[in-house]
Image (cartoon, grey):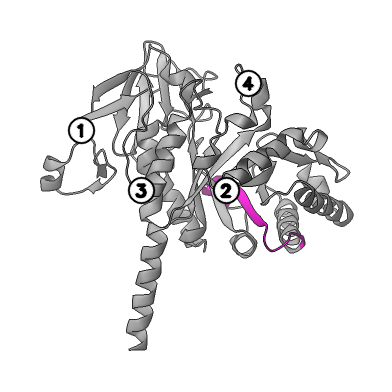
């Protein structure tokens, strides 16, 4: 009887988790003000997000704080006002790719680490922030054991110093390449959620041009995937309800490539914002239903990217599996003047309602024929299709891009 009650309880908890509205986290780049046109804090769609992460603040070598918000917090203060009025929380992200070098000397020294933590806690209090996000990214591999120890000390002591009502999260690698240098027990104990960077899964470092953020593996076209991220970190003891998956609002363009899995001109791979991809009329857009990834091919190259459709399918996958939520890097990449954020719109609808309709926004509409997918197959609503009867009846024939 007790066993039956326990099973029933766990089933109910699982259903509640799957049906609850997941976290929707958007990173705001503090350099957005330099974009043309400028992307300032008043343009962020706070009402769609549960959290907005100001990026970035880093440590100086003396343990003081460095970054635009540390030097002049006026824009951050405005963000807090806008966000809190919409019921959205504001978190400051620490570090960032290419900006994490000072973490090692500061976190490795007891006095400097203590000073840095004290400065962070005071900063959170001074600016009415809702938490902090650790984005310490190593630029080298292998990572020395001393670095892992320093990371663990910083994370543990920061959690102890922060008020209980302030969250602590971290941006983390999705694969074993860097993931193996982290200590899951320390992460689980101290973090409210794990933000897996399930993007940059292809780039100039690859032999072939692959997909950037595939949901599922697809032989010859993917190096890693969201599904493999879940499996890897789950085996290491991370609870599913603490997992946040990252959607890029940018793509990777490869010169000389003819499609996914093809050769490309080395040194040519680059990130391109979604808003710039869709306004380029040279691209012939396609969709891979196996990996749930959109891509474009032109006479000169190939681009792999997320659009409202693929983002919605991935968001529904998160919602239906009871994961913690979605994070987007970053909120300016899909912002179109006079239109808004089509990718963010689509994610918000999928997380709230579980639907995967294309986000409504103005522009041209294009239909393309889907190639017959292999291996795992999903229909245009993201449902897995495994048997011939379901496949025959599934709406796989057309996919509509709406811009």
Residue 272 location (% of width, % of height): 51, 22
Residue 350's quadrant in the figure? Answer: top left
User: Does the magenta segment cover residue 387?
Assistant: no
* Mark positioned earlier in the residue sequence (1 or 2): 2
Residue 264 location (% of width, % of height): 44, 20
* Mark positioned earlier in the residue sequence (4 or 2): 4
Q: Residues within 10 Å of mark 2 (few under 14, many from 20)?
A: some
Give the foreground label among 3 and 1.
Answer: 3
| Circle 2 residue | 87
The part of the chain drawn in magenta is 161-179
Look at 42% across and 27% down and name the residue there: 304
377 with respect to 208 (left or right)? left
Look at 51% across and 26% down and name the residue there: 335
Residue 365 location (% of width, % of height): 30, 20
CA distance separating discs 4 and 2: 25 Å
| Circle 4 residue | 38
Disc number placed over residue 329 in the picture, else none: none
Q: Residues within 10 Å of mark 3 (few under 14, many from 20)?
A: some
* Mark positioned earlier in the residue sequence (2 or 3): 2
| Circle 1 residue | 372
């Amino acid at each position: 009887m007790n066993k039956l009650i326990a099973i029933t309880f766990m089933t109910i908890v699982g259903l509640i988790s799957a049906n609850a509205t997941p976290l929707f986290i958007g990173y705001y780049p503090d350099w957005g003000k330099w974009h043309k046109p400028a992307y300032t804090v008043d343009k962020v769609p706070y009402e769609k997000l549960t959290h907005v992460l100001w990026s970035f603040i880093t440590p100086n070598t003396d343990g003081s704080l460095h970054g635009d918000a540390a030097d002049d917090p006026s824009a951050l203060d405005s963000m807090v006002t806008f966000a809190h009025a919409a019921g959205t929380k504001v978190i400051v992200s620490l570090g960032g790719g290419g900006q994490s070098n000072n973490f090692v000397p500061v976190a490795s020294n007891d006095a400097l680490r203590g000073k840095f933590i004290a400065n962070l806690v005071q900063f959170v209090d001074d600016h009415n922030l809702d938490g902090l996000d650790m984005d310490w990214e190593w630029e080298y591999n292998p990572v020395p054991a001393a670095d892992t120890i320093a990371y663990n000390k910083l994370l543990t002591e920061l959690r102890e110093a922060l008020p209980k009502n302030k969250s602590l999260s971290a941006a983390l690698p999705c694969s074993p390449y860097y993931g193996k240098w982290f200590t899951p027990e320390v992460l689980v104990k101290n973090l409210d959620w794990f933000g897996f960077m399930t993007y940059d899964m292809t780039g100039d470092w690859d032999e072939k041009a692959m997909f950037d953020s595939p949901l599922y593996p697809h032989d010859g076209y993917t190096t890693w995937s969201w599904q493999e991220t879940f499996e890897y970190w789950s085996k290491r003891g991370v609870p599913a309800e603490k997992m946040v998956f990252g959607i890029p609002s940018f793509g990777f363009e490869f010169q000389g490539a003819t499609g996914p899995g093809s050769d490309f001109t080395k040194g040519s791979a680059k990130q391109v914002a979604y808003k710039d991809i869709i306004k380029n009329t040279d691209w012939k857009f396609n969709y891979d239903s196996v990996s749930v990834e959109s891509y474009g091919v032109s006479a000169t190259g190939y681009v792999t990217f997320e659009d409202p459709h693929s983002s919605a399918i991935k968001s529904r996958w998160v919602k239906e599996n009871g994961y913690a939520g979605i994070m987007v890097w970053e909120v300016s990449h899909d912002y179109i003047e006079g239109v808004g954020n089509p990718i963010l719109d689509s994610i918000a609808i999928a997380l709230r309602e579980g639907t995967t309709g294309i986000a409504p926004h103005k522009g041209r509409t294009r239909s393309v024929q889907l190639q017959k997918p292999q291996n795992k197959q999903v229909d245009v609503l993201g449902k897995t299709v495994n048997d011939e009867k379901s496949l025959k009846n599934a709406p796989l024939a057309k996919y509509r891009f709406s811009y």
